[in-house]
Image (cartoon, grey):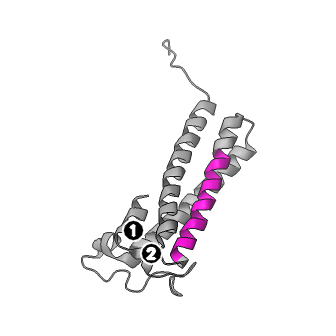
Amino acid sequence: MLLGALVAGLHAGLIYNTWPSMDGRVLPESAFALHPWWINFFENAGLAQFDHRMCAYVVALGAAALWLVVRRTEPKGDALRASSNVLVAIVLAQIVLGIATLLNQSPLALAASHQAGAVALLAAGLWNVFEHSRAAPHYTADASA
């Protein structure tokens, strides 16, 4: 969400409106043009968009891996499976909204939907963590040990 805020604040959705490449490149042109180098992560619109994309891929892979783990382990409750399903569904919706927003040069309705999706994804992630904590065995401290 923080990287999305940088993208929105820098109006980075108005440039590099191609996917999966960034105008035919992996890294945006002039990714590290600003000095000192580290400021590019906060003030270079192209690099902010690149970082947002890479983080989105990591989140998607993580959600898919978590979903597979829940599916392959012994049943730990319908709520955990449901929260995992919702989490993956929202991640997929976010991917579709993000790509559509980018390809259409950030129209307000799509951009706002993508931002609302980020809030929904945060809520789904918190729900999933809660269900994981409920499904995990609870250990009590043994006073005699």
Q: Please name the residue that numbered disc 2 is placed on.
A: 13
**Residue at the front extreme?**
109
**In magenta stretch: residue 44:** no
The structure residue drawn at horizontal position 65% and vertical position 54%, both measured from the top left corner, is: 89
The answer to whether residue 61 is above or below residue 9 is above
**In the rendering, at what x and y percent does residue 50 appear?**
46, 74
The structure residue drawn at horizontal position 50% and vertical position 12%, both measured from the top left corner, is: 144
Q: Please name the residue that numbered disc 1 is placed on.
A: 8
**In the rendering, at what x and y percent does residue 133 appear?**
57, 34
**Can residue 61 be seen by looking at this rendering?**
no
**In the rendering, at what x and y percent does residue 34 appear?**
28, 80
**In magenta stretch: residue 92:** yes
**Can residue 11 be seen by looking at this rendering?**
yes
Q: Give the total of numbered labels.
A: 2
Q: Are marks 2 and 1 in contact (CB under 8 Å)?
A: yes
Task: Check disc 1 and give the amino acid type.
Answer: Ala
Q: Predominant secondary structure in magenta?
A: helix
Secondary structure under tag 1 reads helix
The answer to whether residue 40 is above or below residue 57 is below
Task: Check disc 2 and give the amino acid type.
Answer: Gly
Locate the N terminus by quadrant: bottom left
> Which mark is on residue 82?
none
Q: Residues within 10 Å of mark 2 (few under 14, many from 20)?
A: many
Stretch of the chain drawn in magenta: 84-102
**In the rendering, at what x and y percent does residue 41 appear?**
34, 70
Of the numbered discs 2 and 1, the one sitting upstream in the chain is: 1
Secondary structure under tag 2 reads helix
Q: On the rendered structure, is 60 left or right of 10? A: right
**Residue at the left extreme?**
36
Tell me how far mark 2 sits from mark 1, CA to CA.
Answer: 7 Å
Based on the displayed image, in which of its 4 quarters is residue 90 positioned?
Answer: bottom right
